[in-house]
Amino acid sequence: MRPAPLVAIVGPTASGKSALGIRLAQEFGGEVLACDSTQVYRHFDIGTGKVPRAEQQGIPHHLMDLVEPDAVFTAGEFRQRAIAVLDDLPSRGKLPILTVGTGLYLRALLEGLADAPTRSEELRERLRSRAVRRGSEYLHRILKRLDPKAAARIAPQDEPKLIRAIEVCILAKKPISDVHRAGRAPLEGWQPVKIGLNPPRVALYERINQRVEQMLEAGWLDEVRRLIDMGIADTAKPFQFIGYKTLRAMLITR
């Protein structure tokens, strides 16, 4: 049987990907799947670029608002949820259109995931404490000793990726690069078609500035205020997202 087409839109701005996703869905009878690690969290709407229901133009949007802000959501769980949606679309003759904000999630879906160890919060906390005392560059030096190939791919400032890479190396007792090469099960029955949005850098910066202003005008600051009033802890992952952390700090220090 010939693989069914699956469209993945990648690019730097959520609004551009969302607009194109809706346009393609209208043109070719599709439904949108949000492939974004920020949009899976409920209540965090404006700053994550979720398309409001009133602006979805009747096109179903999947894989948004899946978990509460205090939940731990992984690429593996995203893959399971996405496959469940994909399994349903062919019977209704619908084209899946992924708006991709998180490359890891797209790779997990298309290429599969290695059989990596589960998270160890105790180990992670020790690594975070060391990063606080000695900087994320210290974690990068540890990873360079454990797995030079992985260290070459991860920036010294990218603390979350460094922690996960070190965690896997220690728990698996082998380099994370070796773990990633083994045991992947790629997505079957689909033919990915990737569309990349690559505007000129000057235009991109201008678009980003305009988008931030639009989000603030749409009530982003009020949304953050409501989230604080709801009692959502500052340690919740969504409060580490770009913009949310800054706005929360500004409101708390007033």
Image (cartoon, helix red, strand yellow):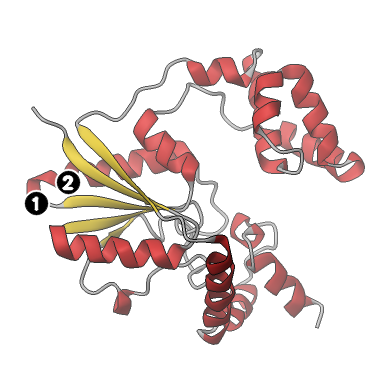
In the rendering, which numbered label is found on residue 88?
Answer: 2
Q: Which residue occupies 81% across, 40% down?
A: 136
Which quadrant would the C terminus be assigned to in this image? bottom right
Left or right: where 135 falls relative to 194 = right
Residue type (three-letter) at the residue carrying disc 2: Asp
In the structure shown, which secondary structural element does the residue marked by tag 1 occupy?
helix
How many C-alpha atoms fall within 10 Å of the one at disc 1: few (<14), some, or many (≥20)? few
- In depth, the one of 49 and 88 nearer the eye is 49
Left or right: where 132 falls relative to 20 = right
Residue type (three-letter) at the residue carrying disc 1: Arg
Q: Which residue occupies 47% across, 60% down?
A: 199
- In depth, the one of 130 and 161 nearer the eye is 161
Which residue is situated farthest in the right direction here? 133
Q: Are marks 1 and 2 in contact (CB under 8 Å)?
A: yes
Q: What percent of the width, then of the height, locates residue 224?
A: 61, 75
Q: Is residue 58 above or below residue 178?
A: below
In the structure shown, which secondary structural element does the residue marked by tag 2 occupy?
helix
**How far is disc 1 from disc 2 in space, using C-alphas?**
7 Å
Q: What percent of the width, then of the height, locates residue 114?
A: 47, 23
How many C-alpha atoms fall within 10 Å of the one at disc 2: few (<14), some, or many (≥20)? few
Question: Which residue position is annotated with label 1?
Answer: 92
Q: Is residue 247 visible?
A: yes
Task: Specify the quadrant of the image occupied by residue 174.
Answer: top right
Q: Is residue 233 above or below residue 36?
A: below
